[in-house]
Amino acid sequence: MAPSFEADIRPLFRDQDVRAMSFAFDLASHEDVKENAADIYRQLAAGDMPCDGAWPAEQVHRFREWMESGSAP
């Protein structure tokens, strides 16, 4: 079963992440994350996001699964 935004992806973004990235997109918004999924994934995979330290590989993988499941372009 593919990850869902509300249950699996949104909880990965802390409130501080949402605030820090608000200049570029709204990490609390399914539509904004979906539209920017490829860019967000590149930053997550490179360890550049969030700005205070990279996500564990499992979380990056979960985001990629969600993105590739058709939930994001």
Image (cartoon, rainbow, N blue to C red):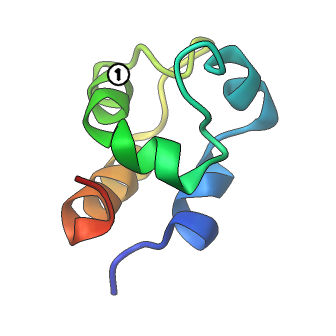
Which x, y percent locates residue 51? Answer: 57, 12
In which quadrant of the rendered view does residue 38 lie?
A: top left
In which quadrant of the rendered view does residue 23 lie?
A: top right
Residue at figure coordinates x 23%, y 68% from the top left: 70
SS at mark 1 in the image: helix
Residue at figure coordinates x 41%, y 13% from the top left: 48
Give, as a three-letter code, the residue at label 1: Gln
In which quadrant of the rendered view does residue 60 lie?
A: top left
For disc 1, the marked residue is: 43
Residue at figure coordinates x 39%, y 50% from the top left: 34
Rendered view: 13 above or below 25: below
> How many marks on residues?
1
Which x, y percent locates residue 61? Answer: 31, 52
Rendered view: 68 above or below 4: above
Residue lying furthest bottom in this view?
A: 1
Quadrant holding the N terminus: bottom left
Residue lying furthest right in this view?
A: 15
- Of 33 and 49, the residue lying toward us: 33
Residue at figure coordinates x 67%, y 45% from the top left: 28
Other residues around mark 1 within 10 Å, as few (<14) / some (14–19) / many (≥20): some
- Of 21 and 50, the residue lying toward us: 21
Horizontally, is 22 left or right of 8 in the view? Answer: right
Rendered view: 4 above or below 59: below
Which x, y percent locates residue 12? Answer: 61, 48
Horizontally, is 36 left or right of 59 in the view? Answer: left
Horizontally, is 13 left or right of 41 in the view? Answer: right
Which x, y percent locates residue 63? Answer: 38, 52
